[in-house]
Image (cartoon, helix red, strand yellow):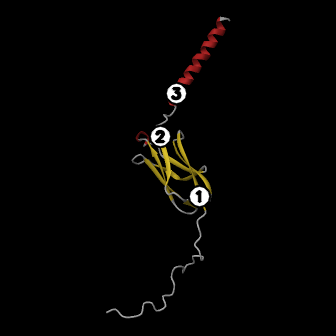
Amino acid sequence: MSSFGIKRAGFGLTAFGAITAAAVLVAPQASALVQSIAVSGTTHYVGTPYTVTADVTATSFLFKVTFTDNGTQIGEPVAVSNGKATITWTPTTAGAHEIKAVQELISAKTVTIDVAAKPTIPGGGGADSGSGDLGGLLTGSAG
């Protein structure tokens, strides 16, 4: 192998080593940002609001958390306070919803929530539902 070929191979290995070292230095720490995500409630219904909470490390309070539902952003990015970022989420469709908390595009956690259609009230539950005629039950005198 010529001296030119050896120098070229050496340069390639040096460049590869430098790129690898740079990637390791800028890679996020596994525990640096979003630690977990949770949704309030145990049964979830369409049209009912729930609180979504992301727990983050104390070192990441400078970065806002963006929440998404099946890839669609929920509200505006949320500031971290006392190691938590919270937002209200109201599902609009039944089925599986992947709720994700993302912090600065380098740390994310997801949870999948099954959402059911809101149960209906027997009898239609109209505007006057629950107010029957008391028909003389309140007659008499206090005394």
User: Vertically, is 15 above or below 44?
Assistant: above
Question: Left or right: 100 with respect to 141?
Answer: right
How crowded pointer 2 is (Cα within 10 Å; few <14, some 14-19, many 20+) is rated as many
Q: Secondary structure at mark 3?
A: helix
Ranked by sequence position, the earlier of labels 1 and 3 is 3
Q: Which mark is residue 33?
A: 2
Residue identifier under label 1: 115
Question: Left or right: 32 with respect to 98?
Answer: left
Give how far across and how far down residue 100 sits, in percent: 55, 47
| Residue type (three-letter) at the residue carrying disc 3 | Val
Residue identifier under label 3: 24
Give how far across and how far down residue 75 sits, in percent: 53, 54
- Which residue corresponds to the image point at 55% horizontal and 78% vertical from the top-left? 127
Q: CA distance from mark 1 to mark 3?
A: 40 Å
Q: Nearer the viewer, residue 95 or 90?
A: 95
Q: Are marks 2 and 1 in contact (CB under 8 Å)?
A: no
The residue mark sitting in front, 2 or 1, is 1
How crowded pointer 1 is (Cα within 10 Å; few <14, some 14-19, many 20+) is rated as some
Q: Residue furthest left?
A: 143
Q: Secondary structure at mark 2?
A: loop
| Residue type (three-letter) at the residue carrying disc 2 | Leu
Quarter of the figure with the N terminus:
top right
- Which residue corresponds to the image point at 51% horizontal and 84% vertical from the top-left? 132
- Which residue corresponds to the image point at 57% horizontal and 78% vertical from the top-left? 126
- Which residue corresponds to the image point at 63% horizontal and 13% vertical from the top-left? 9
Q: CA distance from mark 3 to mark 2?
A: 17 Å
Ranked by sequence position, the earlier of labels 2 and 1 is 2
Q: Quadrant of residue 15?
A: top right
| Residue type (three-letter) at the residue carrying disc 1 | Val
